[in-house]
Amino acid sequence: MMKEKDLQETYIERLNTLLPTVDLRKLDQSCNSTKDEYAKAMLKQMHDMFVEVYGTDYLEVGGYGFVELPAVIQARNTGHIGLGIVTLDLESSGEHGGTFFLTPLGVIDQEKRTPAQAKYLSTVYIPYDYWYTVSLERDHHVDFDNVPEKVADLLRTCHGGQPEMKDSLTRADEQGKASIWEPEQPNGPVMK
């Protein structure tokens, strides 16, 4: 089995192979329209790559150190939606360590940005909320009980083979809010 660092490096390498092929303008437009098939396909591809590398989409806090997770990001002020990669420290119960935004200007690392990129992020995204596509044990930093409907719709794409998640999102939709299914099994859903 690969060590945690090897898994992280492998996933980053896979992302670095994928990202140059993404039409970032089309992605941004897709995230913010009813024609969101492209955004769903890209998010699913990033999620599936994570599952291929890690062998699961359920991580226990304390088990992996730092991980990069595919995520949907929504600006609190503008409502703008985009995809990104969030870095979390699983040694410290999921502390957010940074975000890579997939923007029409390119991939922007929130921690290492140019003045033009900083202006774009502050105008379009900051402050923001994020929701990642994998399940984490006991992460209290992200509110999966109150996911905006458009974000939940994007996240649903990553869990098409998990009827429990689909049922949970449908029930939440009927109640006027979406929430993300969390597995009742302590080790997460069974992968077939």
Image (spheres, helix red, strand yellow):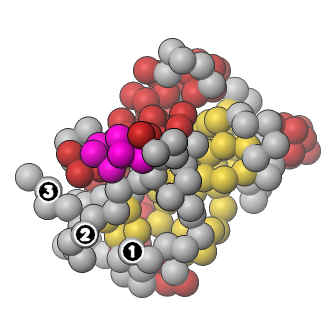
As helix, strand or loop, the secondary structure at mark 1 comes to loop
Frontmost of labels 1 and 3 is 1
**Left or right of 162: which side holds 30?**
right
Q: Position of residue 100 (x, y in %)?
A: 63, 49
Q: Residue at x 86, y 45 (%)?
A: 122
Q: Position of residue 172 (x, y in %)?
A: 42, 47
Give the mark nearest the N terminus, 1 or 2.
Answer: 1
Residue at the spot of label 1 = 137
Question: Can residue 20 be spotted in the picture?
Answer: no
Frontmost of labels 3 and 2 is 2
Q: Position of residue 145 (x, y in %)?
A: 50, 58
Residue type at mark 1 is Glu
As helix, strand or loop, the secondary structure at mark 2 comes to loop
* 107 or 148, nearer to the observer: 148
* 121 or 190, nearer to the observer: 190
Q: Which residues are magenta?
A: 166-172
- CA–CA distance between discs 1 and 2? 11 Å
Residue at the top extreme of this rendering: 35
Compared with 181, 150 (above or below) is above
Q: Residue at x 50, y 58 (%)?
A: 144
Compared with 1, 12 (above or below) is above
Residue at the spot of label 2 = 184
**Left or right of 189: which side holds 44?**
right
- CA–CA distance between discs 3 and 2? 14 Å
Give the mark nearest the N terminus, 1 or 3.
Answer: 1
Compared with 87, 95 (above or below) is below
Residue type at mark 2 is Glu
As helix, strand or loop, the secondary structure at mark 3 comes to loop
Residue type at mark 3 is Met
Q: Indicate whether residue 150 is drawn in magenta.
A: no
Image quadrant containing the N terminus? bottom left
